[in-house]
Every structure is written in structure tokens, then in C-alpha cells.
Image (cartoon, rainbow, N blue to C red):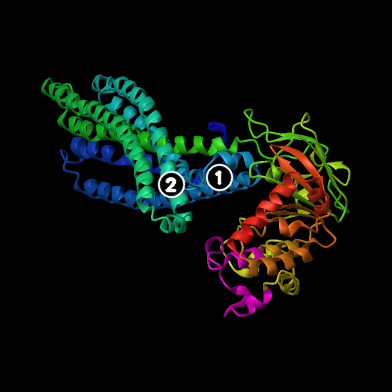
Amino acid sequence: MLKRFIAYYGPHKKMLVLDMAASLLISVIGMVYPIMTNRMLNTYIPEKMYDKIVIAGVIVLALYAVRMFLRFFVQYYGHVIGVKMQSRMRIDLFKHLQKLPFEFYDNNETGRIMTRITSDLFEVCELAHHGPENLLISSVMIILSFCYLLSIDWILTLIVFACVPILVVVTLHYRKLMNRAFEDRRKSNATINAAVESSVTGIRVTKAYTNAECEIEKFERGDDQFVDASKRAYNAMAKFFSSTSFVSDVFNVFILIAGGLFLYGGRITFGDYSTFIVSVNLFINPVNTLINFMEQYQNGVTGFKRFLEIMDEKPETDSPDAKELTDVNGEIEFRNVSYSYDETKEVLHDINLKIEKGRKLALVGPSGGGKTTLCHLLPHFYTLGPENGAILIDGQDIRSLTLDSVRRNIGIVQQDVFLFVGTIRENILYGRPDATEEEVIEAAKRANIHNYVMTLANGYDTEIGERGVKLSGGQKQRLSIARVFLKDPAILILDEATSALDNTTEVLIQQALDELCKVRTTLVVAHRLSTIRNADEIAVVMDGKITERGTHEELMALGGTYKSLYSLQFRDNDIFE
């Protein structure tokens, strides 16, 4: 872990060296004051060398002015190094998140992921800056002050130094407790963030069902966990600091007693005794700095561990000999496909389907039968094992093709449309970022959304809000269709694209979808069976198996599940009418 952390210092070596050099000079200048104090008390003042007293004061003042600029350099550029390292880690983490498979997002809440990118990496940034600085300055100050104390009186110095092993033992003991406690605190903080993200995203549902109290209760449970974890963390930290502070206080007691006895016995002079008292603080303070640094170290290490947890997640990768999918005709074949999300239940079993170029296959059946899973497997969102059959596009196993080339040639329109914060234009351009303005407008026209956009004051530059909150369901759906028109894929997946719309809006969108399906191979998951009567073939999927196949007329004549579903749906429609 340390090696991976140090690697992020790589691009900042020169600035880090300058920062450490400045820190070293700060330490050296810190030794000037006790040296000058000793000379004044033992030489300049007793011998009435007033000119030397003034010169010494001026020298110390000048060095302190230099130290002021050095501290500015260390504080500013040291933090800049930390921020740049944090930025690099954040970018690396975000890039890695883009490469992770669907399974990762199935098992990790958005709020928890956001915590890793924000607050966790902030603590890493603080460690990146203060870690080397504190270690260098404190270590140098301890060594220099210890050597100087030895030059005054070695026995008195060893008496003081005898307390250090006790301090080390106490530090190591409580560090383990702090490590566990702060790890729990991080996890509970992530729980709070996840609760906030979920609640804010679903605020309209919360208000619609007047369930604010339920959300508050869930948040308070997470907050209670955070408070409890914080109590344990701060309890360990309080024990740590109170114990180490007590040991540090013992330093001063030993100096007071031993120094007084040595002075009384004539072993040291009053000037040496005064200098020792001043100098011993130069030894104790950096020791305390290292002790206080433990909290920051613990936070930073915990944050970096959580960063590495995601970075070590296995990303989606192409097979070593993967080829680009080019000149796509759009022929699709599911060959003996079986799949399960976990070992407990098989979602698909021995599926065999073939869709010829430019034809439309509709999948119907009860919810949970496996229709959407088939749609997710085709763009390689989930990977089939070698024993689970194969999915082919134009006769090529998608596992032998690059992920990007497969997905570039597949367009998806879902019931739950996701739009990004930004303008209408930016969301349409998501289909092909390098498209021209004319191509964007043409795609909008073909999706039956252009006329609506022209009624808006800002036209295509209209902000749509988070997830398109300022648009109606039908407008969002047509915007997503325009996005696919711009992408112009050879293969199209329609996953219940019209099931949540009113009849008038459905007509507009169905016209757009019919236009979109032309000359494309289309896989349709249908809830409203009236929308797929003209499909080239319909497959009934139940319990992960295909139980019926044929055209609408053939399946109606068969008198099986499809006819039952169709009759039930239209009977329900008659009831509501």
C-alpha cells in the first residue's frame, strides 16, 4: 500500500524536494534560539558584551523572517502537492469506476461511492501534504535537539530520553484501537451519504406518499450509527492523547527535579539549566507533533485503503485477442444461453433465438421471466461464462469482440429514461458528441421532439434539471429516442419503452420508434402487447425459458400463454374504458 501511495508523488518530485528542503531549514533555524540563549546567559550577559547581545538578537530576527517565508512556501506548495495528488487519485478512481462491470453497481450504493471520491480522498490529501513535512521536521528537530542537549549535560539528557520508550509503547497500543474505530466511522459516514443520496433522488416519491417521517427515521438510524462509531473513535483518541500528554508532562517534571538537583550540586550552571529548559521543549514539541499526527495519519490511511478497495475491483476487460466489430449487418443469435446473477437461482436457461438482419423480435411474458436480462446480455453488460452458451452478432461471439465496438453498434431505449444534468442539446449529443447542429436537429425531428423544443425560450439550450425533472415523461422518452437516432446503431433494444405513457403520447413515441426501427435489427421487450403485433416474431419468456414462438397470428391460433396475456390485457382495457 505504501508503495502505491508514494507513486502519486512521482509527478511532483522537484516540488517535493524543495518542500522538504524548506522544512529542513525550518528545523535548523529552530535550533538557533536555544544556542543564542545559552551564549547570552553564559557569555554575553556575564561579560557585559552588549554589542554581541544586539547582534545576536538581529541575527535571530533575520532568521525568523526567513523562516516565515519558508513556512509560507511549505504551507502553500505543500498543500498544492496534496491537492494535485488528490486530484490524480480522484481522476484515477473516476476512470476506474467507468470501467467497472454492472455487478459492482448492483452491489454498491451511489452515496457510498461518492464518499470514497470526496471526503475519503480529502483526508488522503491532508496526509500527502502533512505526512512528509511532519515526519521530516519532527525527526530532524528531535535529532538536533537531542544532540544539543547531550552537549549541555549527557546524564540529564538520558534521563529525559528514558521517557521516550514509554511514549512509543503507549502510542502503538492506542494506534490499533484508533485504526479500527476510525475505519468504522468511515463506513458509517458512507451510510449517511448513501441515505441522503437515495432520499434526495426520491424526494418526489417521498412527498407523494407523505413518508417524510420514514425517511427521517432511516436517516436517523444511519446518523446514530455514525455517532456511535464516532464515540468509539474519539474514546480511543482521547485515551491516546491523554496518555501521551501525561508522558510528555513527565518530561518536564524530570527536568524540573533533576535539573534543579544538578544546579544545586554545581554540575551545571544557571545558564545551562535555563538553556536546557528551553531546549528540552524543542525535543518534546516535535515528539508531541508526531503523536498528534497519528489522528491525521489514521484518517489518511483509512481513506487510502477505501480508495484502493475500489481501485482493486476487477474492471471490464476485452479478451486478449478481441477484434473490433465493424461493417455490422445486425444479425443476432442467442445460442444455448443460460445465466444466473448468483448461484442461488438461474435466470435464463438454454435460450436459443436468432434474429435476421433488419427484423424485429418481441419478448413478452410475466415480470421476472428474464426478458430484461437478455437485453442486458446482448451489449455485454454482464459476461457469460464459457459453459453458459454464446451470443453472436453477425456470426461473431461478442466475447471475442471489444466491448466498445459492440456497444457502439447497439442503441437502447428504456422505460426508465436517464438524462444528465445539462441542456437538451447536450443530452441529444450524448448519442454522438461530434455531431453537427444540423444532425442534432434532424434527430430531434425524427423523434418528434423538435417542435416542442422550439416553443421553449432557450430552445436547445434549455436546462432540463436533474434527471430531466423539468420535462414530462413523454418528452424525456422522445429526447432519449433522439439520442439513439443520432447514434445511428445497427441494432436496437427497446425495453418497455412506451409502457409508462398515456395513449396520446404513446402514439407520438410509437411513430418515432417505428421510424427508428427501420433498417435496424430490433429486440423489443413489450408490456403493451398491442405495440408488437407487427413484430416479425414474438417469443414468450417464462421462468427463464422460451415457451412459445411465432407471429401474433400464429400465437393467437396456438391458444397458449400469449393468447391468455393478450386477451387479459384487452379485457382490462375494456374494463377501464
Taking the image as shown, residue 123 lies to the left or right of residue 62, namely right
Q: Where is residue 262 in the image (x, y as percent from the top left)?
A: 16, 22
Give the magenta part as a residue range: 450-479
**Location of residue 209 (image quadrant):** bottom left
- Residue at horizontal 32 percent and vertical 49 percent from the top: 64
- Residue at horizontal 48 percent and vertical 47 percent from the top: 111
Q: Position of residue 266 (x, y in %)?
A: 14, 22
When the figure is inspected, residue 186 is found, relative to residue 178, above or below; the finding is: below
Q: In this view of the protein, which residue sits in the foreground, 464 or 77? A: 464
Identify the mark at residue 195; answer none if there is no mark.
Answer: 2
Q: Which amino acid does label 2 sit on?
A: Ala
- Residue at horizontal 49 percent and vertical 43 percent from the top: 112
Please, what secondary structure does the residue beneath circle 2 have? Answer: helix
Looking at the rendered image, the disc whose residue lies closer to the viewer, 1 or 2, is 2
- Count of marks overlaid on the render: 2
Q: In this view of the protein, which residue sits in the foreground, 270 or 217? A: 217
When the figure is inspected, residue 227 is found, relative to residue 210, above or below; the finding is: above
**Location of residue 162 (image quadrant):** top left
Q: Position of residue 419 (x, y in %)?
A: 60, 60
Taking the image as shown, residue 312 lies to the left or right of residue 168, namely right
Q: In this view of the protein, which residue sits in the foreground, 86 or 332? A: 332
Judging by the rendered image, the residue that carries numbered circle 1 is 89
* Residue 466 in view of the camera: yes
Tell me which label, 1 or 2, sits earlier in the chain. Answer: 1
Q: Quadrant of the image for the C terminus?
A: bottom right
Mark 2, Cα crowd under 10 Å, few <14 / some 14-19 / many 20+, is: many
Q: Position of residue 320 (x, y in %)?
A: 80, 36
As measured in the structure, the alpha-carbon distance from the residue carrying label 1 to the one carrying label 2 is: 25 Å
Taking the image as shown, residue 190 lies to the left or right of residue 552, namely left
Q: In this view of the protein, which residue sits in the foreground, 228 or 242? A: 228
